[in-house]
C-alpha cells in the first residue's frame, strides 16, 4: 500500500435551503399547517386522558379540572385548538380519495363518492357522540 495515497472524497453539492422555504407557496403553507396541526390532535387526546383520570380520582379532582378549563384564557386557547383540529380533519378527509382506491364490481368508485362517504361518517359520528353526551 502506498503511504502517500489518500482516498478522494468529493464534496457533494448541496443547495442551502432556508428554514422558512415553505412560506413561498400557499400549497406548502397548507401542507405544513396540516402537518403541524397533528400536535393539536395529540393535545386533545392527552386532554381527554387527563379528563378521564380526573373523573377517576373523584369529584374534587374533576371540579378542579373543570374550574381550570372554564378560565377565559383556557377557553380562548381551546377555541383555537378546535379551529386547528377542524382544519386538520377537513384537510385529512380531503386526502382520502387520493389514498383510497375502492373497486365495486371491477369498477373504481368515484373520488367524490369516497369523499362524501367520509364526510357522512364524520357527521354521523359527531351526532352519535353529541347524542351520547347530551341525551335524547
Image (cartoon, rainbow, N blue to C red):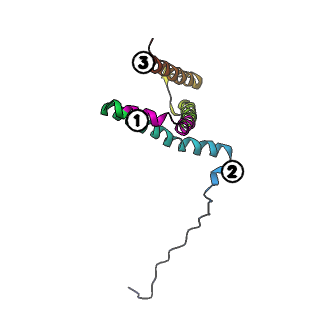
Give how far across and how far down residue 134 sits, in percent. 45, 17
Which quadrant holds residue 2? bottom left
Q: In this picture, is 62 found above or below 1?
A: above
Magenta stretch: dominant secondary structure: helix
Callout 1 environment at 10 Å: few (<14), some (14 to 19), or many (20+)?
Answer: few
Q: Which mark is residue 132?
A: 3
Instruction: Say whether disc 1 or disc 2 marks the residue closer to the N-terminus.
Output: 2
Contact check, label 3 and label 2, Cβ < 8 Å:
no
Label 3's element? helix
Residue highlighted by disc 1: 64
Q: Which mark is residue 31?
A: none
Between circles 1 and 3, the one closer to the viewer is 1
**Magenta part of the chain:** 62-80
The quadrant of the picture occupied by the C terminus is: top left
Between circles 1 and 2, the one closer to the viewer is 1
Q: Residue furthest top?
A: 136
Residue highlighted by disc 2: 24
Q: Which residue shows up at 64% across the image and 54% down it?
A: 21
C-alpha distance separating marks 3 and 2: 45 Å
Amino acid at each position: 500500500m502506498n503511504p502517500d495515497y489518500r482516498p478522494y472524497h468529493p464534496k457533494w453539492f448541496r443547495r442551502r435551503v432556508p428554514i422558512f422555504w415553505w412560506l413561498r407557496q400557499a400549497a406548502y403553507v397548507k401542507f405544513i399547517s396540516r402537518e403541524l396541526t397533528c400536535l393539536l390532535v395529540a393535545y386533545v387526546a392527552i386532554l381527554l386522558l387527563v379528563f378521564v383520570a380526573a373523573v377517576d380520582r373523584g369529584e374534587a379532582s374533576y371540579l378542579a379540572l373543570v374550574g381550570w378549563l372554564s378560565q377565559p384564557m383556557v377557553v380562548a386557547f381551546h377555541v383555537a385548538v378546535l379551529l386547528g383540529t377542524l382544519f386538520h380533519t377537513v384537510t385529512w378527509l380531503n386526502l382520502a380519495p387520493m389514498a383510497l382506491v375502492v373497486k365495486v364490481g371491477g369498477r373504481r368508485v368515484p373520488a367524490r363518492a369516497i369523499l362524501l362517504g367520509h364526510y357522512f361518517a364524520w357527521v354521523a359520528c359527531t351526532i352519535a357522540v353529541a347524542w351520547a353526551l347530551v341525551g335524547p
